[in-house]
Each structure stands twice: as structure tokens, then as C-alpha cells.
Image: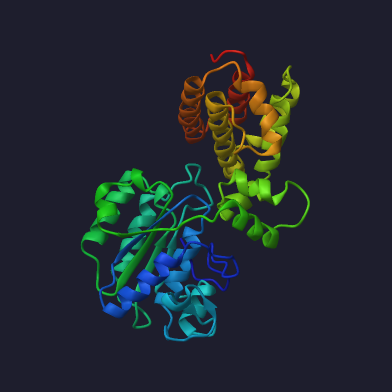
Amino acid sequence: MNEPQDAPAPGFDPEQPLIGHEMLTSALVQSMAGGRVAHGWLLTGPAGSGKGLMARLAAAWMLAEDRNANAGLDLGGETGFALDRDDPGTGLVMRSVHPDLMIVEPDSEDNKSGQIKLAQIRKLLSFMGRKPARDGWRVAVIDSMDDVNRNGANALLKLLEEPPAKTILFLTASRPGRLPPTIRSRCRVVRIVAPDSTACSQILDDRLASGGMPHTELARLADGAPGRALKLAESGAADCYMAVCSLLAAPTLDQPALSAMCTKWGKGGSDGATLRDGAIWLIARLLRLCALHANTGTLAEACAFEANAIKQISVSRDAAAWATAHAAFLGAARQADGLYLDFAHFLLRELTNFHRKTLP
């Protein structure tokens, strides 16, 4: 949760390119012009598609003291809005010192679960119940609802049912179907669309140094979501995956090398959370591609370095078996990570089993 400090707001990078945000910018402008603004906005879309950044930029626009300014960051052309960096309200948001904005996200310290805790939601309720300090709106961003447990969601429901005047709440969710229907039904839902792999690759060219994995392949691994691609690259998860695919492509599995790689990829604690998330995403992708190859023989969606691994491990199982393995892996991986089990050992066991001739 944000505390006043003279630093950029968490997750607020106004230089990051935005794609697929037009529905939100136009809907927000039109609702403001019509005088009927929804108190709750639910931004959905793939992880890494820019939902959190878009929510923060929308909050900055809501708290601008001159929303009609045409200068600054143009987010939506004729139907969207612009941010004037010199506007007093916008400037306070960008420096994370606006008294009428609260950002709620998982605490980075002493939080093994990675969840947004009930105490944070209660602080949010208290914050939204107070009058605006600058005689405007009171705005909050929850990034993301995927990290809010059921108790937190139930506590939030009262705010959505009986919102105080001149308050607005931006929620993000990559898996909106898991949210309670009562939350979804009380929000205006806007989908943020991830760019295609070509557009994502162009964004990565601007954001990442040359060298390492080609940006076209990073974009493909991330299904076109720039935020996810950046995390896969910067955490080292993409490099770990490439190394693992090379090991799986061999007729005989190099067990010591795989064990060493899993130790690196399965790093525990909060420091390794992004690596572990990348492992879950990428191995699930590999299993999905194995099922597709077993069913149709195609490798069209695979990166070049994935192809040999897929051909090596997919041939001895049918598509249904790989689909079952995919679902089982996702369930077991989330459980292993959530229960703080030895994730490196879990990865080693799973990858070794995938290389065997028959599923265990």
C-alpha cells in the first residue's frame, strides 16, 4: 500500500507504451461527460498486458485539477484523455504523494503468501470513507484482485454496494472468473487487450538491451503481453526455460544438469517469486504445445528452441494424456508454491517425469 514519499508511484511508468487501452479511456471520458461515473471499474486481461499501469494513469487523470488540458501524454486520441505532467494533481500522483490516492498491492516484506491482506483492505475502506483532501475525488487502485482472498473480497463488497460520494475504485484482474459474482456485477468491466507478438516485440526492442533471447521469441513466450515478457527476461526465467528445453531435447536426460537448473529456477522466498511464476507459466506452455503436437503434429506456435524438446518428449503420449498432465501440473505447482514446499525439488520431479516414456 502506498505511503507518501517523493518517489514514483508503485508500478507507475508513464513512459511505458500502452496498447489496448482505448476502451477504458473512451469509457471514462464519456461517463465523466455524462455525469454518471461508475464507482467501480474492473480492468481485465492477460497478466502483463498493462492493466495496473492503465489503472494508475486513469487515477492520475481523475485527480488532475484540469482534465481538459490538451498537453502531455495523449492516451486515447479523440475519444480518450491526455495527462498534463505539469498539472498539480497529476504531478502529485506521479510522485506518489497525492493525499487522495491509495495504491493497494501485495506487501513486498514479510509476506510469503504474496496476497493482499485483509488488513490492507480495511485500511482502504477507512481511506475511502474520508473526505477528499484536495476537494476533488478519492481514488484507489487494487492491483490486483487475483491477490485478494475471499475475506478481503467480502470486505470490499460493502464499499462497492454503498460507495461514498466522489469515490472511484479501479480493480485489475487477470482471472476475473475467479472473483465473486457480486464483485463483478457491481463494477464496469473493461478488457485490456494484449498486443500481438509483433507489437510486443517492438516494445521489447525499446525496453530491453540487445543480446540474450531474441525479442521475437520472448514476445511469443509471453503471448504478446509486454509486462510478462519483461518479467520473463529480467528475472532470468526465460533463460532457465531455454536451458531446460535443451536438456529435455536430449535422448538421455542429464540429471545433474537438470537438478542444477531447477535449483536456480526454483529459488525460494519472495526474491524468487517472479522466477517461480515464470516457471509455472513456461512449463504449462510447454505441456500445452506437447498436447497440440501430439494431436495435430504442428509446431507453428513453438519457438525454435522449444521444437526439439517438444518432438523428443511428446511422441510417446497422446494429446489427452498431455492435456491431463497440463491441468495436473498447474494444480500441483500452485499448491507447492502456496505451501512453501521445496519448489526446486518439485520442478526436478515434474520435468524428469515429462522426459520419461510414460506418465507416472
Of all residues, the one furthest to the right in this rendering is 211
On screen, residue 201 above or below 113: below
Q: In the drawing, does residue 340 fall left or right of residue 310?
A: left
Residue drawn at (68%, 44%) of the image: 236
Toward the viewer: 88 or 85? 85
Residue drawn at (73%, 46%) of the image: 213
Residue drawn at (71%, 41%) of the image: 239
Total labels: the figure holds 0
Quadrant in the picture for residue 40: bottom left
On screen, residue 10 above or below 356: below
Quadrant in the picture for residue 131: bottom left
Q: Is residue 127 visible?
A: no
Residue 1: % across, % down: 46, 60
On screen, residue 50 above or below 79: above
Residue 202: % across, % down: 65, 59
Residue 129: % across, % down: 28, 68
Residue 342: % across, % down: 58, 29
